[in-house]
Amino acid sequence: TDYNESMNTVLPQELLRFNKLYRVIFDSVVALQKAVKGLAVMTPELEAVGTAFLDNKVPGNWKKVSYPSLKPLSGYVADFLSRIFFMSTWVKSGPPVCFWISGFFFTQAFLTGVKQNMARAYKVPIDKVMWNYNLQSPNVLPSVKENMWHNALSSPSKGCFVYGLFIQGARWDESRLGISESLPKILFEEMPVIHMDPVPLHEDKTPAMHYACPVYKESARKG
């Protein structure tokens, strides 16, 4: 284990959170199946789980240990399985070339880990490190979404590639290398792959004309 690699701390923390959620999901589904068959008592808690299933909603006991999500039950389960695949493949194959940033439980820990790697490598205090953002060609995105480990990108020497961000009420315009008005009848647009590059404050290359866009984990704009 390389103790200077912050991802070796971030990944186990993510796995602990996902395993906790998986156990709650597994236990509640098994218990509900037994209760329906008459092999166990149908408690109010299990009845609430069953009602949520019928309404295509995420049960309350799942939400208590879950990442933020506004998806209905069907979409939530598909999303959960995608996140599990992301994490399990990371364990088996090592870190991907491009990270699915919206697939993390606690995104802030991941981003702090990337900053720590840079700070240790370049011997810079982490509180003197900031982000620069370099958007890649939109043509790269399809190959990344198909396979995070083997695609048109190569792992950057510093920072990380991420995808999975969406912009509301606007769009990335590759011809202008900037933000433009959204197209008719399209509220959300997927952003291209972004190279998140941690740099010392004195090496900041943020353009004078830029928009500091807030980022949220869900469309309710919380977190």
Image (cartoon, rainbow, N blue to C red):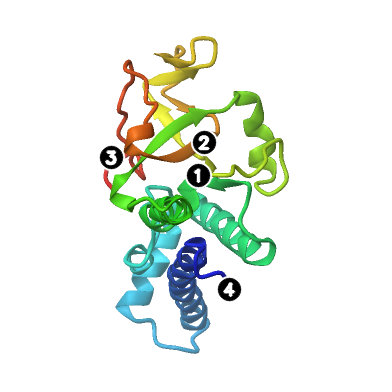
- 4 and 3 marks in contact (CB < 8 Å): no
At label 3, the amino acid type is: Arg
Badge 4 or badge 1: first in the primary sequence: 4
- 4 and 2 marks in contact (CB < 8 Å): no
Q: Which residue is mark 2?
A: 195
Task: Return the x and y of residue 140 as percentages of the image width and height.
Answer: 65, 30
Q: Nearer the viewer, residue 67 or 45?
A: 67
Instruction: State the CA–CA distance, disc 4 to disc 3.
Output: 38 Å
Badge 4 or badge 2: first in the primary sequence: 4
Q: Which mark is residue 77?
A: none
Residue at 47% x, 79% y: name it. 27
- 2 and 1 marks in contact (CB < 8 Å): yes
Q: Which residue is mark 3?
A: 221
Task: Tell whether 127 sits left or right of 35.
Answer: left
Q: Which mark is residue 1?
A: 4
Q: Which mark is residue 159?
A: 1
At label 2, the amino acid type is: His
At label 4, the amino acid type is: Thr
Task: Tell whether 200 sits left or right of 99.
Answer: left
Above or below residue 161? Residue 30 is below
Instruction: State the CA–CA distance, disc 2 to disc 3.
Output: 24 Å
Mark 2 or mark 1: which is in front?
1
